[in-house]
Image (cartoon, rainbow, N blue to C red):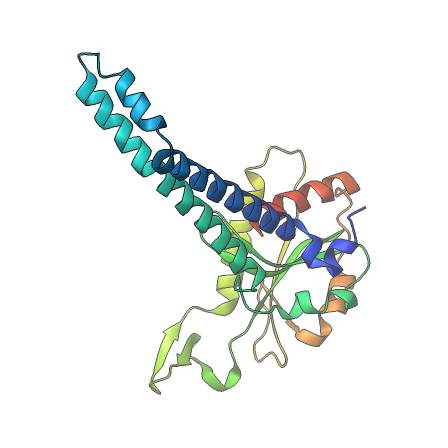
Amino acid sequence: MLNQRREHLPGLTMRSLAVTGLLAAGIGWLAIGLVAGWVVFFTPLLERTASLTSRSAAAPLLGAASWAVALTAPACFVVLGITRLARAATHLLGRSGPRRPVHAMARRLPDGVVSLPTIHLPDGRQIPDVVLGPHGIAFFEPLPPPAATRQVGGRWEARFSDGLWRPIENPLDRAARDADSLRRYLAEDDRDFVVKVHPVVTSIAPQVERTDTCAVVPLGAVPGWIAALPVQRSLSAARLQHVRDLLDRLS
């Protein structure tokens, strides 16, 4: 069985482990940089190293190389440390993305499922509100606000801040393409089973009809819709955990 606590305590999921790793790496690189700087600028080690190579015919070249490494290495280590710490701070401050409505209702979802707020595919696509369970994978992309979007001759348009209406991608087509991208990513993994992927668009009051490739579900009906999905019998507990591990790498 999947670990049920991970859907209710996202701070203890793989994301928290990633933050811990970033913090450890940042502190480690920063410490190495500070120690290296102290060795270079406050001890005679570099001068002694230069004097040992002064008898060689290549002394000027070796000396220049030693000074170049000594002067740049501490700064590089410090920059690496600061970068890792900044990334950790970004995660801790919650800047990785907006609040996801389906993930926020994790406690209302059926037993045996886990939810992730967002995954990032290698091709650059970002998929929100991913729910994994005996049904396979379902994800829920929000429809644009009805007051700011319209359909004209089968084409979607949105009203921008300047008041003009401009074409936008059909949300249902986008969700279907995201599902194809996720299927391709899963297909790259060497396994002997297929995971069903269910793309869904949702809002408080959906104003569009479902298509053959994408479902449309009112936000409040999501828990019941997930519960009604047919069980994919090929997904054993071990296989579900394997898929969860794959998704964790993208979160």
Q: Would residue 123 be seen by someone viewing this image from the given angle?
A: no
Q: Residue at x 33, y 85 (%)?
A: 162
Q: Nearer the viewer, residue 116 or 170?
A: 116
State whether residue 153 is above or below residue 82.
Answer: below
> Quarter-wise, where is residue 186 in the image?
top right
Q: State the image coordinates of residue 137 (x, y, percent, origin top left).
A: 66, 53
Q: Residue 16, how many percent across, how many down? A: 64, 52
Q: Residue at x 73, y 40 (%)?
A: 239
Residue 174 position in % (x across, y down):
49, 63
In the figure, is residue 45 to the left or right of 67?
A: right
At 77% across and 48% down in the image, what residue appears? 2
Examine the rendering and report whether any part of residue 240 can be seen. Answer: yes
Q: From this view, report whether residue 38 is shown above or below residue 199.
A: above
The location of residue 249, given as percent across then percent down, is 58, 45
How many numbered dots are placed on residues in this image?
A: 0
**Residue placed farthest to the top in the image?**
56
Q: Nearer the viewer, residue 78 or 10?
A: 78
Tell me if 92 is positioned left or right of 49 in this view: right
| 173 and 103: which is toward the camera | 103
Q: Residue at x 36, y 27 (%)?
A: 45
In the rendered view, does 58 fall on the left or right side of 108? Answer: left
